[in-house]
Image (cartoon, rainbow, N blue to C red):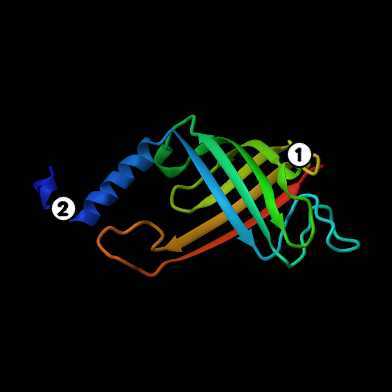
Amino acid sequence: ANDTNPADKSAQQKFDTRRAVSTIDREFGFITSLTRSGGGPSAGSTAAAGAQPGASGNNGSLQAGAEAYWRPFGYRNGSTVEIFGRVFQTLQDRSGGATGTQTAQATVGARWKPWSSQNVVVSFGRLIPIGAQASSDWLAQLAYSDGIGTDLRVDRPSWWTTQWYAEAGRYLQ
């Protein structure tokens, strides 16, 4: 039995409890992003002679996206399975590649986080072209991420944080 009064908990402890309940109860979610990069993939880019289709130069790109996901089996002690659908497009490509709706790319797929103690995620998705410069393909991915101090703190105005992420993927067509 817990002999402590919930009113005796600190603001951070109350926040952490609410966050844990929210994470366990979450059955679906929605994510939006706006990403600036110094290089990397950009649909329809033809920046350099002999470049791979969709390869961007070092001039940078700006991409916007949205994703919805559903956890059909619930939280499962942190070993989740998610069905997802997402759409991304390139808003700006400083290397001269395609931008706008012609780069719109949808993906539907599934991802699995096999271990609750490690943030390893395996995913498989079908890329569906919406715009004329988007691809039709299958994509298998393996990702790992971790970090320190990445959640909100209500007990401090500022704190140190770091995050790392690695991903490998393979287009199958």
Q: Quadrant of residue 95?
A: bottom right
Badge 1 marks a residue whose secondary structure is loop
What residue is shown at x 53% (from left), y 45% (from top)?
32
Q: Quadrant of the N terminus?
A: top left
Residue 78: x and y in percent read 43, 44
Indicate left or right for 78 with 42 as reference: left
Q: Quadrant of residue 123?
A: top right
User: As drawn, which residue projects farthest toward the right?
Assistant: 49
* Label 1, residues with CA under 10 Å away: few <14, some 14-19, many ≥20: some
What residue is shown at x 11% (from left), y 52% (from top)?
8
Residue 45: x and y in percent read 80, 55
Q: Amino acid at mark 1?
A: Gly
- Measured in 3D between alpha carbons, the distance from the residue under mark 2 to the one under mark 1, in whole angstroms, is 52 Å
Residue ID for mark 2: 9
In this rendered view, identify the residue nearer to me: 145 or 151: 151
What residue is shown at x 29% (from left), y 65% (from top)?
157
Residue 92 appears in the figure = yes
Residue 71: x and y in percent read 48, 33
Residue ID for mark 1: 131
Badge 2 marks a residue whose secondary structure is loop
